[in-house]
Image: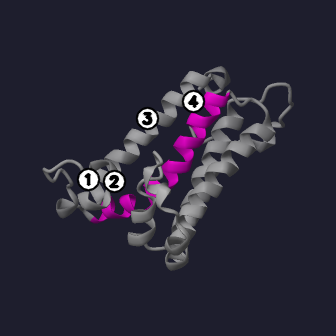
């Protein structure tokens, strides 16, 4: 894959959106519909959880946690047109931090729910935070998955090349 393609903002956004769709598909296959916020409004149960094989359950446990920071980092980097190492690191750390905050909200759910203002339920993308915190279970392996997803995003963006900076070939890890 060409460095120019990976540097292209539209390609980054498209790759991130494709990964999000893949993550949504994994959720549909591996989790109960009642636990999927973007499917709660559908009355017909489209989840295949009752038909899951062991490998789908395993993939469904951690692969979405890898995909989330990876996809949103690529989308954000595409929108912001990040080309410098510091910008790329900043975007990666932002999504890692955000996912980590959400995960720790599950560990300290009583305190978080007590301090959470009511207006949070009215904010787009945060409307599900209360339910996520209340019903979720803290899993340290989710934190590892977030770290790995952020690392993959970093490697993809770095492999795409950094404008106005020299990068030694020894830092590249090929996974394509």
Q: Nearer the viewer, mark 3 or mark 2?
A: 2
Would residue 47 be found to the left or right of residue 73 on screen? left
Residue that mark 3 sits on: 18
Would residue 152 be found to the left or right of residue 167 on screen? left
Check whether the beta carbons of the residues at disc 4 and disc 3 lie within 8 A of each other.
no
Question: Could you tell me if residue 153 is visible in this image?
Answer: yes
Residue name at image x 65 percent, y 57 percent:
97
Of residues 53 and 37, the one drawn nearer to the viewer in this rendering:
37
Residue that mark 2 sits on: 37
Q: Nearer the viewer, mark 4 or mark 1?
A: 1
Sequence order check, earlier mark of 4 and 3:
4
Question: Could you tell me if residue 140 is visible in this image?
Answer: no
Estimate how packed mark 2 is, as few (under 14), some (14 to 19) or many (20 or more) residues with alpha carbons within 10 Å.
Answer: few
Estimate how packed mark 4 is, as few (under 14), some (14 to 19) or many (20 or more) residues with alpha carbons within 10 Å.
Answer: many
Q: CA distance from mark 4 to mark 1?
A: 29 Å
Q: Is residue 175 above or below residue 163?
A: below
Check whether the beta carbons of the residues at disc 1 and disc 2 lie within 8 A of each other.
yes
Estimate how packed mark 1 is, as few (under 14), some (14 to 19) or many (20 or more) residues with alpha carbons within 10 Å.
Answer: few
Q: Is residue 15 above or below residue 67?
A: above
Residue name at image x 61 percent, y 24 percent:
9
Quick one: SS at disc 3? helix
Estimate how packed mark 3 is, as few (under 14), some (14 to 19) or many (20 or more) residues with alpha carbons within 10 Å.
Answer: few
Mark seen at residue 40: 1
Which contiguous range is marked in magenta? 54-80
């Amino acid at each position: 894959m060409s460095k120019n393609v990976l540097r292209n903002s539209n390609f980054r956004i498209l790759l991130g959106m494709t990964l999000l769709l893949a993550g949504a598909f994994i959720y549909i296959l591996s989790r109960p519909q009642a636990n999927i916020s973007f499917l709660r409004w559908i009355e017909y149960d489209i989840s295949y959880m009752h038909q899951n094989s062991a490998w789908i359950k395993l993939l469904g446990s951690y692969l979405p946690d890898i995909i989330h920071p990876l996809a949103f980092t690529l989308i954000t980097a595409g929108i912001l047109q990040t080309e410098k190492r510091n910008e790329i690191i900043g975007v990666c750390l932002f999504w890692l931090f955000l996912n980590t905050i959400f995960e720790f909200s599950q560990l300290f759910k009583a305190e978080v729910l007590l301090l959470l203002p009511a207006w949070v339920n009215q904010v787009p993308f945060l409307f599900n935070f209360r339910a996520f915190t209340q019903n979720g279970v803290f899993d340290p392996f989710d934190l590892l998955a977030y770290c790995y997803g952020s690392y993959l995003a970093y490697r993809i963006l770095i492999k795409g090349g950094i404008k106005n900076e020299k990068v030694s070939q020894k830092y590249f890890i090929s996974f394509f």
